Image (tube, grey):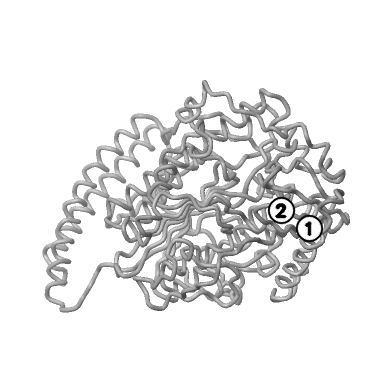
Amino acid sequence: MVAPSNRNRFNKLTVASLCLCVVISVYHSVSSGKILKQFIVKSSFEDAVAVLPGLGGSNTGEDVDDDLGFDDGMADKHEYQDDDDGDNNKDDDNVENEGSGDEEENTSIKVVSTEIKEIEASEETERKEEAVEEVATEEGTSHQQDNNKMNVLIFYPDDWRHDSIGSEKPYVLTPFLDQLAKEGIRFTQNAVTTSICWMSRATLWMGQYTSRHKSYKLKCPRFGSKENWKHSWVKLLQNSGYFIGHVGKWQYYTYKTANYFDWAKLFEGHHWETIYGGRRVHASDLAKEYALQFFEERPKDKNFVLSIAFYPPKPVGDGRAPGHQWSPTNETRKLYENVTIPEPETKDSYKKLPQFLHRGPAVGRFGQRYGTSEHFQASMKNYYALITGVDQACKEIVDKLKEEGLYNNTMIIFTTDNGMFHGAHGLAGKWYPYQESIRVPLIIYDPRMPKKKIGTLDDSFTLNVDLAETILGATGVKPDELMQGRDISDLYLPNKKNEYHDTASVKVEPWREEFFYEFPSPEEVFIPSSTALVRKQWKYIKWPAHDYEQLFNLEEDPLENNDLFNEMSVKPILDKLRERHDELKTQLHNTSYGPRDPSCDGFLDFLHEIQKAEAR
């Protein structure tokens, strides 16, 4: 038998939902002669709206992939949107968020929805009061997350170079990130081990070099198989009771992402998105809205990790008009109206590059994006305006974290998947092992951080391969044996005993003073493979398919403008670097696992993917 309070609640919501359906149905019938195909009375406002065309509800997507054997959970299986993958469609001109119909319809909906929300607010209060009473009568029952465990919030935009923040370039407006660095640590020499979107993202999830996770190609995420995914930090934390969410870019669209996360909202490929009801919203704002929705819907009795993969500031399409490949909002673009962006010192030095780099997408895209001063200024202003938009979105998400009282129990990581040349060396894009391509920002806010470390800069070599173990270290979960990085908190919690978990590993050996970079291209004609040994003073680069080597003194030549390979005075140094490079390469490749997936090979298929995917 239904309790009186529940019966009244049901009756009020049913009547209100019915009113909403009638208003919209009548409107459509009168104005356009169309009758709603579905009319279902639901027990809540959200459910009522879900069946109305163009007003809401989640896409059902495809069925869960049984071969992976994972639970669908609360994940929202959105239909995948391609990743600027060669549809070469320019986003519409900068447009403010638009409504989903004319003013009369929106007004009618607003009146009814306001009444319903008021009812639900009242009912929510009743539910909370009833919940408190229930807890009081059930000894030992808890509806709160374990405060002895840390949550983790990951901000992960696309194509963002290490120095594209206000603390490096004052004309770049990132007030939130600048403040986050003051409350945490900024790692100034952070780098990726492979500078390309999908390989770098696989490294984020797995904590492995590309030579180990072997996800060489966009449509072949080998790390996503059931056997390999169990080694990811996501699966390890799910096994430990964490609730894992992901918002934004996923990219590995061959697989059904709902099987990987407990909660997911996926979209990518554009700077402006059209969502339910025809409302246009900027991609950064949409990521923010979904992140806030995650906080509302997450189970409050579980600790969480939420990753937010912003699509901006990545370029979209191949338009040749000045600034055409970046579409910020009007508000953020106006902030850069009276700014002149300095052009790179090495813009005209591409002739110093190896001859085989004089062709290919990096040179071709330079002409599209930065070929003239007008192109450069328009492109960089739009790019930085997108960055400012992401910065604003991050702030609002963290404000929500503070509102819920979670800020002092949550690690926040801000980093990106790869750098960008922005015209340096006469190049666009990334891929190659030069500094502009491989270095990316990293800011970590950690409530465990000692006061003397807060607001400091750290020039240690931190890498994207370290992020998995850093996340696991903060949550007290043992890293997987196949991970190849290190918990970055070792740099600011020396000789630590984790105050949250006794199980966290403690490493006392010195931090790395060098690292190995690899770019295993499936087809040399398009983008050549490369490897490198990187130290603070020296960088040794090898282009294996061309039997070509380079050597740079980074202390004297930080812009890598003078190749010293043929200088006899540095030959002893060169010999030692080459030997160490080969040693590290052998170590990495000898510890890789599993055969290369033959379905990921082949020139034509790879070239098609490259042309289709702007995320190279």
**What is the distance, in whole Å, between disc 1 and disc 2 at their CAs?**
9 Å
Mark 1 and mark 2 in contact? Answer it, CB < 8 Å: yes
Judged from the image, the secondary structure of the residue bearing numbered disc 2 is strand
Q: Looking at the picture, which amino acid does disc 1 mark?
A: Ile
Q: Nearer the viewer, mark 1 or mark 2?
A: 1
* Observer-nearest of 493 and 273: 493
Numbered circle sitting on residue 573:
1
Q: Position of residue 594 (x, y in %)?
A: 71, 76
Q: Position of residue 332 (x, y in %)?
A: 47, 31
Q: Position of residue 441 (x, y in %)?
A: 54, 48
Point 47% across, 43% down: residue? 275
Point 29% across, 43% down: residue? 22
**Which residue, given by chain and number where applicable, does mark 2 sit on?**
538
Q: Position of residue 530 (x, y in %)?
A: 77, 56
Point 74% across, 57% down: residue? 532
Quadrant housing the N terminus? bottom left
Point 50% across, 67% down: residue? 487
Q: Looking at the picture, which amino acid does disc 2 mark?
A: Trp
* Observer-nearest of 465 and 231: 465
Judged from the image, the secondary structure of the residue bearing numbered disc 1 is helix
Q: Say which label, 1 or 2, has the lower sequence index.
A: 2
Horizontal side of residue 319 vs 139, given as left or right: right
The answer to whether any part of residue 347 appears in the image is yes
* Mark 2: few/some/many CA within 10 Å (<14, 14-19, 20+): many
